Amino acid sequence: MKQTDTFDVTIIGGGAAGLFAAFYSGLRSMSTKIIETTGELGGKMHVYPEKMVWDVGGLPPLTGADLIDKSIEQGLTFDPTVVVNETVTAITKTAQGHFVLETASGERHYSRTVIIAIGSGILDPHKLEVEGLGECEAPNIHYAVQSLKDFKDKTVLISGGGNTAIDWANELERVAKHVYLIYRGEALGGHEAMIEQLLEGSVEFLPERSITNIQTNSGATLIKWSSVTRQPAKRQRWMLMTSLSITDINGIQVC
């Protein structure tokens, strides 16, 4: 089909939801187009290629990379038109009831139906805002884990208390020298089975703490935390980390 042709369905977003939408619209013999803002399909799963994903119906636990492959294979079953590196900036409705999608590059796409499958939007980690972070943000501070082997035999600190933080703590426990999980709340908020695994393992859980300062010293990272209870000044300490540490895993996902 030509760029100016009107598609039955245009899907904004090429992640897991967008790919399944493309599969199902193809199953219904609808002409389908996917518009993805990045250069590749797969969406947020690219942030955690080695992390085990446990909660996909019909599939046993598998890595993010394997889930990407399976999602793309299914999504492209009926040969949808795929447009990458294009960001939709405006959608207008014509007098005929169709839609015109304009992108940042000035391209126009035409469709009878639009499905918005952007999840939490364009990937942008929630940066940890603490004193001293700017001086040591790279390479000691990480907002994603592309390879578990990068953390082999390292002391790792993870900040967060949701599913993502808990899952990464469990994954990194297998390869890291030691894993700390620091969380400003008291009770963890992830899946119960994963919480049980964490509490039964060697991960050291530090509840009701908040990171207040990060410094570097002779290749090591010093992380200062304080209590978030009613007397924050009464409990403080510095924790010595190795040259490769990880913090604010919650930046991967809003938990």
Image: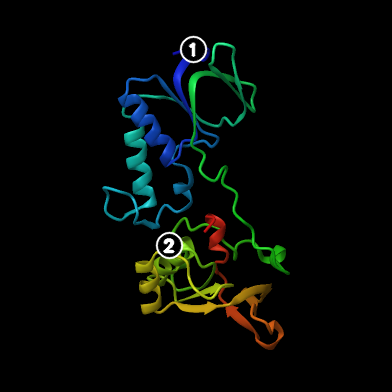
- For the N terminus, give its image quadrant: top left
Residue 101, quarter of the rendered image: top right
Question: Local crowd at mark 2 within 10 Å, few (<14), some, or many (≥20)?
Answer: some
Q: Nearer the viewer, mark 1 or mark 2?
A: 1
- The percent coordinates of residue 99 (x first, y second) are 55, 19
Label 2: which secondary element = helix
Residue 214 visible to an observer of this rendering = no
**Reading the chain from its start, which is encountered first: label 1 or label 2?**
1
As drawn, the residue found furthest toward the bottom would be 234
The local crowd at label 1, few if under 14, some if 14 to 19, many if 20 or more residues have their Cα within 10 Å, is: few
Q: Residue 188: x, y in percent? A: 48, 70
Position of 125 with respect to 197 (left or right) is right
Instruction: Name the residue beneath numbered marker 2.
Output: 148
Considering depth in this image, is 2 or 200 the residue closer to the camera? 200
Left or right side of 26 for 253 = right
Residue 175 percent coordinates (x, y): 40, 70
